[in-house]
């Protein structure tokens, strides 16, 4: 499984949404499932899936699908290529 697939699965499992709702344009609070509770689930899911510990600044800055990819890159996790669908 690629890192992109793992990342998309974090969204699917944490927010309990269909893959079709996960796009590169997805942003915090743009869908009902990505509220403050969903956000905490996403953070925990990212830490578990990629074996990292996010710092508080990154937790606050994680406001979009694309920003999450940039944050993961800071931790040495490359999430590139492919599409969300």
Image (cartoon, helix red, strand yellow):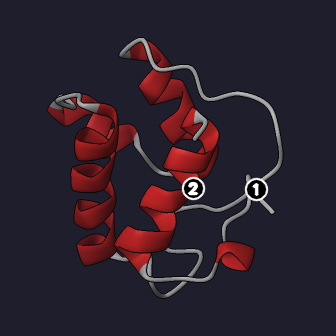
Examine the rendered structure and indicate whether residue 68 appears above or below residue 73: below
Residue at (43% x, 82% y) in the render: 16
* Whole-percent x, y for residue 44 in the image: 21, 53
* Label 2 Cα crowd, 10 Å radius (few <14 / some 14-19 / many 20+): some
Q: Please name whichever residue, 24 or 51, is drawn nearer the observer in this view of the structure.
A: 51
Q: Please name whichever residue, 72 or 8, is drawn nearer the observer in this view of the structure.
A: 8
Q: Are marks 1 and 2 in contact (CB under 8 Å)?
A: yes
Residue at (62% x, 40% y) in the render: 4
Drawn side of residue 43 relative to residue 20, left or right: left
Mark with earlier residue (1, 2)? 2
| Residue farthest toward the front in the current orientation of the protein | 1
Examine the rendered structure and indicate whether residue 40 appears above or below residue 58: below
Examine the rendered structure and indicate whether residue 76 appears above or below residue 31: above
Residue that numbered label 2 is attached to: 8
* Whole-percent x, y for residue 72 in the image: 44, 27
* Whole-percent x, y for residue 26 in the image: 65, 62
Residue 53: quarter of image? top left
Residue that numbered label 1 is attached to: 84
Q: Secondary structure at mark 1?
A: loop
Residue at (28% x, 72% y) in the render: 36
């Amino acid at each position: 499984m690629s890192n992109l697939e793992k990342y998309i699965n974090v969204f699917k499992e944490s927010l309990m949404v269909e893959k079709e709702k996960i796009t590169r344009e997805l942003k915090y609070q743009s869908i009902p499932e990505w509220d403050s509770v969903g956000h905490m689930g996403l953070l925990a899911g990212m830490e578990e899936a990629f074996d990292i510990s996010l710092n508080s600044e990154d937790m606050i800055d994680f406001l979009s699908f694309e920003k999450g990819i940039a944050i993961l890159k800071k931790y040495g996790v490359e999430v590139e290529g492919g599409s969300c669908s």
